[in-house]
Amino acid sequence: MKYKLVTLLIIASSLFAELSFKEIQSAYNSSYTYEAATKYKIAISSLNKVIKEYPKGYTVNYRLGWLYYLSGNYANSLQHLNTALLTYPYSVEVLNTLNLVNVARLDWDKVESQSMNIFKIDYYNYYANYWYTIALMRQAKYGQAIKISNKMLSVFPSNVIFLVTLAESTYLNGSVADALLIFQSAVILDKDNETAKYYLEKK
């Protein structure tokens, strides 16, 4: 596995017949620079030569999947992310990015199913559990959202994000007094947490 990764990421000269290592490095560096400036279309075009020479490459497809997601072109993002998965089917970084596309589309059913796929690989994956909890809440599945929040708090006991999802799910599930106590714990750890402040102020 390590050799395979090194081959994909570093030993590029044997894979790119017409591109030197410096050209490949320059293409990636340009894409990072333009991403930081939120010029996503130019960041994408910076990788044109790389994707042309290596259309099934994991790294370039993952990178383009991310950039197309940022640009709002979800169809192209999915295409590149799914191509990346052909090389590394258990890539949690790709699976989590696929979930971000589902979130952007407000497709909460797919967020649920995608999160479950990630749990088979990484049961306590932070991002998958977070978005799974949000998907459950958006569908008024508050009891399940409470269970997932508690699961994550068992390994991240002072995590404000999951304290807030627990409190909000508990509130919306009808246990207002219990929820307010949890919100109080959240603002002790993060005095500026907007969600906690909102619920505490409306009590």
Image (spheres, grey):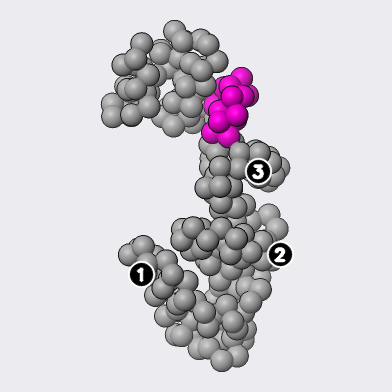
Q: Residue at x 28, y 26 (%)?
A: 191
Amino acid at pointer 3: Lys
Residue 169 position within the rendered picture, expressed as x and y whole percent measured from the top left: 52, 21
Amino acid at pointer 2: Leu
Q: Quadrant of residue 119?
A: top right
Instruction: State left or right for residue 52 relative to residue 88.
Output: left
Q: Give the vertical position of 43 relative to 123 (above or below).
A: below
Q: Give the vertical position of 83 relative to 191 (above or below).
A: below
Q: Residue at x 46, y 10 (%)?
A: 176
Q: Residue at x 45, y 77 (%)?
A: 46
| Tag 3 secondary structure | helix
Q: Which mark is residue 86?
A: 2
Question: Going from the N terminus, do you reach mark 3 or mark 1 first?
Answer: 1
Q: Which residues are magenta?
A: 134-150
* Residues at marks 3 and 1, CA–CA distance in whole angstroms: 32 Å
Instruction: State left or right for residue 142 relative to residue 42.
Output: right
Q: Give the vertical position of 19 relative to 60 (above or below).
A: below
Q: Name the residue beneath numbered marker 3.
A: 110
Q: Which mark is residue 33?
A: 1
| Tag 2 secondary structure | helix
User: Which quarter of the rendering shows the C terminus?
Assistant: top left
